[in-house]
Each structure stands twice: as C-alpha cells, then as structure tokens.
Image (cartoon, rainbow, N blue to C red):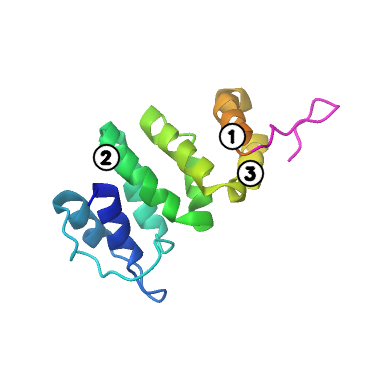
Amino acid sequence: MKTAEKIIETVSAVKPSEKPSLEALKLHLIQSRPDAVRLDEAASHLSSELVAYLLRALENADARFASDIETLLTHGGDAIVPDLVAALNHSNPTVRGTAAMALIRIGSASVQPLKQFYTRHLKPSKIEWIVAFILQELGSTLPKSDSGILTA
C-alpha cells in the first residue's frame, strides 16, 4: 500500500466524535504504523492542529512526502479550506504549491474563500498569480470591478 493510502486510511478511520491526536499522526507519518491512529471512515476530521502540523512538515518534505500530505489534506475537505488558503501566504514554495493543489482538488468549496483572501490581502499583486491559477483551474476568475476596486 502506498504511503499516502496508509496515512489516509489511518486518519480516515476516526469516528465522527473523535479526532486523531497530533502525536498519533506524527508517529504514523514517521513509522508508517497503521495502528498509530484508530481506523474508521473519513479523513474529514482533521483538526486545525493537525493541518498546521502537516503544513509545517511540508517545509522540509521531499516530493513524495509532499504528495502524500497533499492527498491527506485533500481528504480534509471543506473544513480545512481556510487553513489551506492562509498557507498561500507561506514563504516556502512547497507549502504554497501543496496548499494550491489541495485547494484545486477540494474543488468549488475553495472558490469563495480564495476570492475573499485575494480581495482582503494587503498586497494582492504578491499572491495574484497563485490565486488566479487556482481559480482558473476551478473554472473561475479573479474578482475585479469596473472601478478598479476589487470585489469578491
């Protein structure tokens, strides 16, 4: 079984009333131990703490590990879109790129938060290319108005 599948299987197996602990996920990622986190059905129970840990792990991740993390983040669904959108501001290109790809894979739930992020950003030119790319992949465009003022 591929590493991403093992991670997803591990984190997905959390009952709706429970969330995997950060320590259990760390142990699983380091040791690939399927018993480190209880298994159940959906990875949609990623806490903000787990998402933050995964994003931090991307800072030193190789391409394969980054791909595994992207797959896991994608399974986090709509609930983690704000965390992924915020990661577009990160200084590390692997973090930004992985967040962008996860947002694309999550789909239409990413569009409005991306537009709001762009319109509220202090320096929209700094993030314009990445937001434009993601929105284009999702069949949308950057928010603009006739007056030159950005609108969401």
Distance from the alpha carbon under mark 3 to that under mark 2: 26 Å
Task: Give me the residue at 34% from left, 70% from top.
Answer: 14
The relative height of residue 133 versus residue 55 in the rendered view (above or below) is above
> Going by the picture, which residue comes out furthest to the right?
146
Q: Amino acid at mark 2?
A: Phe
Which residue has dot 2 on it? 65
Task: Give me the residue at 69% from left, 32% from top.
Answer: 142
The relative height of residue 75 versus residue 139 in the rendered view (above or below) is below
For the record, the magenta segment spans 139-152
Labels 1 and 3 touching (C-beta < 8 A): no
Q: Does residue 63 appear anywhere in the picture?
A: yes
Q: Amino acid at mark 3?
A: Val
Which residue has dot 3 on it? 111
> Going by the picture, which residue comes out furthest to the front?
1
Q: Quadrant of the C terminus?
A: top right
Write down the quadrant of residue 133 in the picture: top right
Disc on the earlier residue, 3 or 2: 2
Magenta segment: does it hold 129?
Answer: no
Viewer-side label of 1, 3: 1
Which residue has dot 1 on it? 137
Q: Position of residue 129 (x, y in %)?
A: 57, 24
Q: Secondary structure at mark 2?
A: helix
Residue 106 horizontal side relative to residue 122, left or right: left
Distance from the alpha carbon under mark 1 to that under mark 2: 24 Å
